[in-house]
Amino acid sequence: MSFTRSWDAELGATWLDDPSLVSALDVWVRRRMLEHHRRAARPAQQDSLGPWTVDGLVSEIRRHAHSGHWSWATTAICFLQELLFCIDDGAVELSRHLATSFVDEVLTLRYLRNVIAHPARMPVVVGENAVDELCFRMDRDPEFAQFAAELIGNWSLFGDRRVTVFALRRLNTAGRGYIRQLGLLAQR
Amino acid sequence: MVEGVWVGPGQHTPAKPRSFSSAIIPARTTDLASDVSFRCLDLVQIALADNPYDWTWGVLSEAGIYTWGHTIGLNLGEPWRFVTWALGQPRIYSVAYAPALSPGELAREYGPVIGDAARPDYPAVQLTLTLAP
């Protein structure tokens, strides 16, 4: 079971541990932010566009994980997902041009975001909720299937390291796909 | 300009990367080869307005210290290091904030060209780098 793999090893296997890729996405996102500000006739500078940046969020993921604050590390991953995959259109929905090859990974992270970022949202009588949707997707991964079955009945486990690792791997796949789609690798 | 890598607490010193996303500008009087400690500006990558995939170096201002990972860490009192291969073998420096510089002070300490890469409306972040034992 690779659940026994250290956090450093998990992170080290992702684009989040590659400063040149983090920087490529950071610069691209800041530029898109700047364009949205300018379109709205708002004066803006690239170093002060908002509280969340790729570089800052990656450091927060690392910081919280090293402190064992898994729920906050997961939260930072969810925020980074939204920043990366929504900024092109500058709203809260997925940007329209995302390649289909990794959209499913992003959708999985968005179900997780709905659980993490809407703490008062409770189950309803009819229909599935974000927890169901997330656990259904987590169940597809053999490594996480057993945990998914436990998680669906114990929501407090969203503060568990395994959720952070699951989210990190989804973000890695989607982020690498997006880097390729944007042609950022060739620039580095 | 001296390129390098920011290394935070718990992070291992990396191998020399193929390209650098971080850099500093030592103060004019600095002798990198012999100075154990010196002041410098913090350079960050800034996208060019006319090319979505190109960028240039900009001097980090106090307006941006909450948006880069290493300055977020310095704000929290974390021990960050700067690693450079500019002299061949890797050199590791500990990092601390030094007094910020007004746009008018920049040219005096760092030369006239620097002003163009810095924000005119905010003080520039200045760091003290000290060679780690």
Image: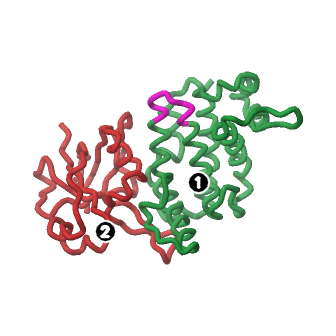
Chain colours: A green, B red
Q: Are marks 2 and 1 on the same chain?
A: no
- The furthest residue to the bottom: B50
Q: In terms of image quadrants, where is residue B121?
A: bottom left
Q: In terms of image quadrants, where is residue A122?
A: top right
The amino acid marked with disc number 2 is Ala
In the rendering, at what x and y percent does residue A120 appear?
Answer: 69, 35
- The furthest residue to the right: A126
Report which residue position mark 2 lands on.
Answer: B118
Say if A9 sits above or below B84 in the image.
Answer: above
Residue A83's label in the rendered image is 1
In the rendering, at what x and y percent does residue A54 appear?
Answer: 50, 52
The chain to which mark 1 is attached is: A
Point out the image quarter for the N terminus of chain B: bottom left
The amino acid marked with disc number 1 is Leu
In the rendering, at what x and y percent does residue A152 appear?
Answer: 75, 26
Q: In terms of image quadrants, where is residue B116?
A: bottom left
- Counting the numbered discs, the total is 2
Q: Is residue A92 magenta?
A: no
Query: Secondary structure under badge 2?
Result: loop
Q: Which residues are magenta?
A: A64-73
Query: Secondary structure under badge 1?
Result: helix
Say if A184 sits above or below B113 in the image.
Answer: above
Whole-number angstrom distance, CA of label 2 to CA of label 1: 26 Å
Q: Residue at x 49, y 47 (%)?
A: A57
- The furthest residue to the front: A120
Point out the image quarter for the C terminus of chain B: top left
Say left or right for A184 vs A120. Answer: left
In the rendering, at what x and y percent does residue A155 appear?
Answer: 69, 26
Q: Residue at x 58, y 74 (%)?
A: A39
Q: Residue at x 45, y 54 (%)?
A: A20
Q: Main secondary structure of the magenta part?
A: helix
